[in-house]
Image (tube, grey):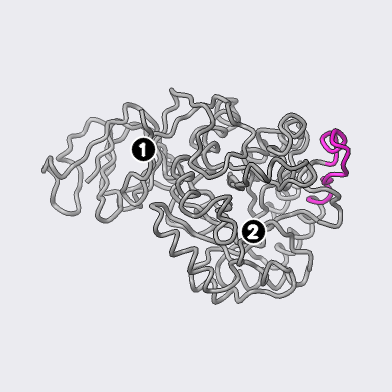
Amino acid sequence: MLLLKNGYMIDPASDTAGYRDILIDKKSGRIVGIVPQGETMESLPCGDGEMGKKDSLEEIDLNGQIVAPGLVDVHVHFRDPGFTYKEDIYTGAAAAARGGFTSVVLMANTKPAVDNPETLDYVLQKGKETGIHVYTCANVTRGLQGRELTDMERLSELGAVGFTDDGIPLTDEELLREALRRAAKCGKPVSLHEENPALITNNGVNAGKAAAHYGIGGSPREAEISMVERDLRIALEEEADLSIQHISTREAVELVRQAKKKSGHIYAEATPHHFTLTEDAVIKYGTLAKMNPPLREEADRLAIIEGLRDGTIDMIATDHAPHSAEEKARPISEAPSGIIGLETALSLGIRELVDKGYLSMMELIGKMSLAPAKLYRLDAGYLKEGGPADLTVFDLRKEWTVGGFASKAANSPFVGERLPGVVSYTICGGEVVYRRAE
């Protein structure tokens, strides 16, 4: 048994905030008791009859730190199989645990792609060895080619929690329509990367001040807007669960806002880098701030924050995208897009959204745990007796310096910054999978 004492519990599912002691049964991996601070240990329920035996009970005094549901990231790249020099499932999971995440959903643009039962099984089985919950999407189309749908029904039966060709937009309208229909029958969402390649000269850099700085064409906002507009229309017609990934433009935020008024099947995610940075960061940090879709203007950043505030954007997802130092050292037009984000996401949310008054801590935790878990039908994102013992513990009174990553990669523009909110413990299935060294 594990007893967490003197923690300040925040649970978005029950809207509970207050000091609680939490008793965990390690054998079952479930929470067996939550009581107000100060109640005696003997009053806590216990499933195996071992309460009162001091030698069977591990106690951790949290001294007022925040206890929240384990964070859930439904958009990560662990590069496994095929690109494990960047990251693998083990190191990606370690980075997730260090950032307070107990559940992650992997994207399927690996090599081979997750378009077949064998690769799906490889990912899921390797994920079971990590200590956290590793889920994965399967591809919408075979080989990410955008021409032929995968056996979505079979892949769903075998454990895929959703479908995406993330990294490559679906340009065939009728193919997307059929994919949405089939995914809906499986009860799974489709998540879309919204950039029309026909409009992009150089991806990863906004076609504005940043592109002009480097003397390249860049990626215009219309590339995202046109795809979002089309895909929302199709999703509304098909009444299928659609998630707009890593939204970057104010126009796309408004399109989602209007679509959500018509249907409960529309969702959107925002990354910490898109609500924190603008294209100025690309001028300052170069390839370390190059990403798809690109960082845009201050008005776009503020629109994303407003979308998070008013519920237009349901969830925060990192789009954790590891790359090697050698790859990021290439010229701006040749280096791959993306940054790592699992280890900085919570702190950036605290600094940019909570500390600046846009969201409450309850709302931030909800967008980083309960909301993504609901979309992907995961048993996660809440704290209650009988519920999963997946928790993150973090200290708002402390700061940390970004660096020394658990990830294989270090491609982040935030390296060296001081950020608030130090993750002290990550507990998954009742086991401590990350403990910060003093």
**Helix, strand or loop under label 2:** strand
Judging depth in this view, the residue of 438 and 254 nearest the camera is 438
Where residue 205 sits in the image (x, y, percent)? 79, 42
Side of 233 where 211 appears, left or right = right
The magenta segment is: 207-224
Asked if residue 215 is among those painted magenta in the image, a careful observer would answer yes
Q: Which residue is mark 2?
A: 191
Judging depth in this view, the residue of 166 and 329 nearest the camera is 329
**Nearer mark to the viewer, of 2 and 1:** 1
Q: Name the residue: 53% across, 56% down.
A: 105
The amino acid pointed to by label 2 is Ser
Judging depth in this view, the residue of 286 and 291 nearest the camera is 286
The amino acid pointed to by label 1 is Arg
For residue 368, which numbered disc appears in the image? none
Where residue 184 sits in the image (x, y, percent)? 60, 69
Mark 1: give few (<14), some (14-19) or many (20+) Cα within 10 Å: some
Q: Which residue is at the far front?
A: 326
Q: Which residue is mark 1?
A: 435
Where residue 39 sits in the image (x, y, percent)? 21, 34
User: Up-down: is 146 above or below 384?
Assistant: below
